[in-house]
Image (cartoon, rainbow, N blue to C red):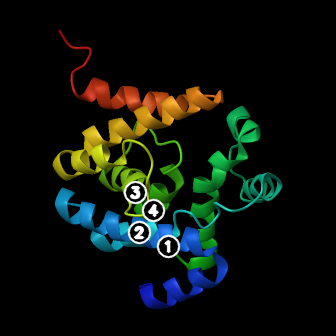
Amino acid sequence: MVNISFLKEQLSLIMPEQRFRHSLGVAETAEKLARKYGADPLKAGLAGLLHDIARDFDDNEMLQRAKKANLAVSEFGFAMPLLLHGPVAAVMARDEYGITDPEILNAIALHTVGSEYMNQLDKIIFVADKIEPNRRHSGVDEIRRQAAQDLDTALLSCFDESIRYALKIGCLLHPTSVKARNAILVARGFFRK
């Protein structure tokens, strides 16, 4: 098993201080959500710690690492390489930190755009990334309240916020995020009569 203290020490050396603090906050928040929603807190903490290890790469390095790892890069990945930081981080977690648990790796990979097939840990990492204590964005307190009551409601709000932000700045909407959002609504009976 991974030595968490050693991992934190290693990450503190390679991540900018603010990003490292964010990752600690995501790990702590994810562990709490995992205990509340029946997921493994250790897996949640590891995924939270490692989810942003590729976040500070420039576009060129992100694309090079994705290519080297044989990741499928869509036109959205080429247009917005930052969206690849989840999948690239999952490869790094596996190759550089010895994480082999597919559930942890999947949660790391999906934390950027989500998926219509998210399991509990995937949802926890996605939400924890948006609500960890260092986050100060508009609407974060409401999403935190939602996360304390219903994970899917909080997840839906996270997708809504991401989509609103993309529209505000005039960038592409990733179709996977739209599908993930719609999957929550369908699961809740939105289209049933």
Mark positioned earlier in the residue sequence (3 or 4): 4
Query: What's the distance in space between the residues labelled 1 and 2, CA to CA?
Result: 6 Å
Q: Position of residue 33 (x, y in %)?
A: 26, 60
Report the amino acid beneath label 3.
Ile
Q: Is residue 50 above or below residue 182?
A: below
Q: Residue at x 56, y 63 (%)?
A: 52
Mark positioned earlier in the residue sequence (3 or 1): 1
Q: Nearer the viewer, mark 2 or mark 3?
A: 2
Contact (CB < 8 A) between labels 3 and 4? no
Task: Using the rendered view, name the quadrant where residue 12 is placed.
Answer: bottom right
Q: Secondary structure at mark 1?
A: helix
Q: Which residue is mark 3?
A: 125
> In the displayed structure, does residue 135 sit left or right of residue 109?
left
Q: Which residue is mark 1?
A: 21
Query: What's the distance in space between the residues labelled 4 and 2, CA to CA?
Result: 22 Å
Query: What's the distance in space between the residues labelled 3 and 4, CA to CA?
Result: 14 Å
Mark sitting on residue 102: 4
The N terminus is located in which quarter?
bottom left
Task: Using the rendered view, name the quadrant where residue 20 is placed.
Answer: bottom right
Q: Which residue is mark 2?
A: 25
